[in-house]
Amino acid sequence: MKMHAKAALVAGALVMATGAGYGIGFAQGGQPHMQNALGYLQSAKTELNLALRDKGGHRTAAVNLVNQAITQVQAGIAVGAGM
């Protein structure tokens, strides 16, 4: 039961964050491909965090790489918006 509650909480947070990201991106000149990429990366991060931990360190490495990709996409969105 706890896992379902955690998954629901994470999914809800992802939906809110993705929705906010879309609104911000379009308000700053519209970058739908970058916003889509950001949403997919956030979804991938959620899935990786929900996966079983025993993956020989590869799951953790993937989470770290996805976090780096999220940071880069956010930086690209900021540059594209003239920030």
Image (tube, grey):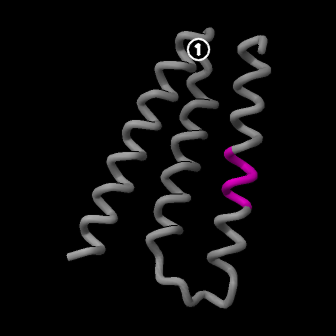
Question: In the current view of this chain or complex, which residue is farthest to the front?
Answer: 2
Q: Nearer the viewer, residue 6 or 56?
A: 6
Quadrant of image for the C terminus = top right
- Look at the image and give the residue range highlighted in magenta: 65-70
Question: In the current view of this chain or complex, which residue is farthest to the left?
Answer: 1
Q: Residue at point 33% right, 65% down?
A: 6
Residue annotated with mark 1: 30
Q: Nearer the viewer, residue 21 or 44?
A: 21
Q: Which element is circle 1 on?
A: loop
Q: Is residue 2 left or right of residue 76?
A: left
Q: Residue at point 45% right, 27% down?
A: 20
Q: Is residue 46 left or right of residue 1?
A: right
Q: Is residue 69 magenta?
A: yes
Badge 1 crowding class, 10 Å Cα cut-off, few under 14, some 14 to 19, many 20 or more, is some
Report the predominant secondary structure element of the magenta stretch.
helix
Residue 14 coordinates in the image, percent (x, y): 42, 46
Identify residue type, mark 1: Gly
Q: Residue at point 76% right, 29% down?
A: 76
Q: Is residue 72 magenta?
A: no
Quadrant of image for the N terminus = bottom left
Vertical placement of residue 25 versus 56, above or below:
above
Q: Is residue 6 left or right of residue 18?
A: left
Residue 45 coordinates in the image, percent (x, y): 55, 59
Residue 42 coordinates in the image, percent (x, y): 54, 49
Q: Residue at point 62% right, 76% down?
A: 59
Q: Is residue 70 left or right of residue 12?
A: right
Residue 57, image quadrant: bottom right
